[in-house]
Image: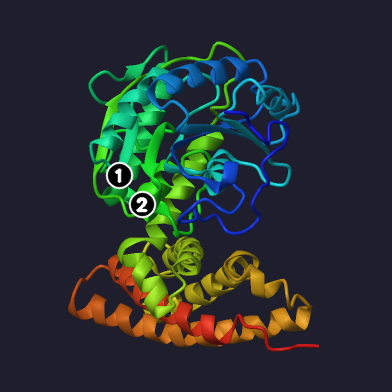
Amino acid sequence: MPNSQSNSLLTVQSDILQIPDSPPTGAGVNGETIHFSLIIPTYKERENIQNVIQILSRLLDEYLPGDYELIVVDDDSPDRTWEVAQSLMAEYHQLRVMRRQNERGLSSAVIRGWQVARGRVLGVIDGDLQHPPEVLGQLLRSIEQGADLAVASRHVDGGGVSSWSAIRRFLSRGAQVLGLILLPGVVGRVSDPMSGYFMVRRDCIAGVTLNPVGYKILLEVIGRGSIERIAEVGYVFCERQEGESKVTWKQYVEYIHHLLRLRLSTGILGRVNQNMGFPIRRFLRFGLVGLSGVFVDMAILYLLSDPSTLALPLTRSKIIAGEIAIFNNFLWNDAWTFADVSMQQKEWHHRLKRFLKFNIICLAGLVINVLVLNLVFNFVIPNRYIANLVAIAVATVWNFWVNLKLSWRVTDVK
């Protein structure tokens, strides 16, 4: 079948990262739907792309003749990978190419490809042959047999890695364990949550706003999509033959960031955030700042009240330690937790006004803190440090909520 768009590039969507229920108008030949769309995200894959297209086309021509498409989404590679792929469109009629110039990142590249895809089943595979193409047939059969999501896994029968170092294996398994701790309801559903080789039914993720971080989009699909049945197929991850590896420590940092974002926006925490309007992410920042204040508070309390140091009365020591911790916390909250507000009003008198409000609110919290400290120390646990931790926890909730409503808000407008 001749390709009427053999020399044209796909238009990059600029709206939110959301998959439509059906292909957008003009997405392909007569806007027709097909069975399978496979996205190949690339960056500096000039040496690999022709071989990848040739192998994938041969396999899919046998399995789904005329009922599939390959979409190369290139992040404006300096080696002009997109140009090489575009030159192949006349020979491979199922091939389409997108060049992204204003966005970067593998996960968003996959979603942009899915947005223009015509397939009822959407898939992704690396552009460097580290994902063996012959596994596509098994993944497609799993979908045909009723799976909503079919994942190629290194950790089931038939799976493995070819020549990973002990450190890389440790990091991979460590990332999975961390995921099971932070997000068991998502990570626990698959054996290889960091897999970048899978396919999913369009209707399971259509209409859902996706918000991925870094290179691992599978977590996003499972966490936000309507995925019921999952199938896994083993595959051996092979080292690349051409080009350079893109695996760095940054991927693991982004993976952790993604886990935390999903944790805060899905499940019980997500429902609390949506239904009550409670800013959980900001509260966590406030809590981390408060944690730094705990160390300041504890250190000053020890220096002032411990029998081996100054041995001042507990209440007086607590007031001084608390005030110093308040000043520490204000500086960090103003620069980080509420930075979006602070940047709108950064004159010195605005900062002074915020500090006075923060101080008054935290002094009220300090009163609560002192009362709780004495109650716990005298009637519950006769340990000054444990009692102090309990008092700090109670006061933290008070401090955050009232400061959110009163201290960091835009009050002066020109």
Where is residue 154, by image quadrant? top left
| In-image side of 165 versus 254 (left or right) | left
**Residue at the spot 58% in from the left edge and 46% down from the top edge:** 30
Q: Which residue was labeled with disc 1? A: 148
Residue 204 placed where, x, y %? 36, 52
Which one is earlier in the sequence, the residue at label 1 or at label 2? 1
Q: Which residue was labeled with disc 2? A: 204
Pointer 1 and pointer 2: residues touching (CB < 8 Å)?
yes
Give residue 236's mark: none
| In-image side of 344 versus 414 (left or right) | left
> Which secondary structure lies at badge 2?
helix
**Residue at the spot 24% in from the left edge and 41% down from the top edge:** 146
Q: In this view, does 170 lie above or below 347?
A: above
Where is residue 148, by image quadrant? top left
Q: Residue lying at the far right in this picture: please name it.
A: 414
Q: Which residue type carries mark 1? A: Asp
Where is residue 393, by image quadrant? bottom left
Residue 144 placed where, x, y %? 28, 36
Q: Which residue type carries mark 2? A: Cys
Is residue 28 visible from the viewing direction of this image? no
> 112 or 294: which is nearer to us?
112
> Which secondary structure lies at badge 1?
loop
Q: In this view, does 58 lie above or below 71?
A: above
Q: How many marks?
A: 2
The quadrant of the image that shows the C terminus is bottom right
> 158 or 141: which is nearer to us?
141
Question: What is the distance, in whole Å, between disc 1 and disc 2 at their CAs?
Answer: 7 Å
Query: Is disc 2 surrounded by few (<14), some (14 to 19) or many (20+) residues within 10 Å?
Result: many
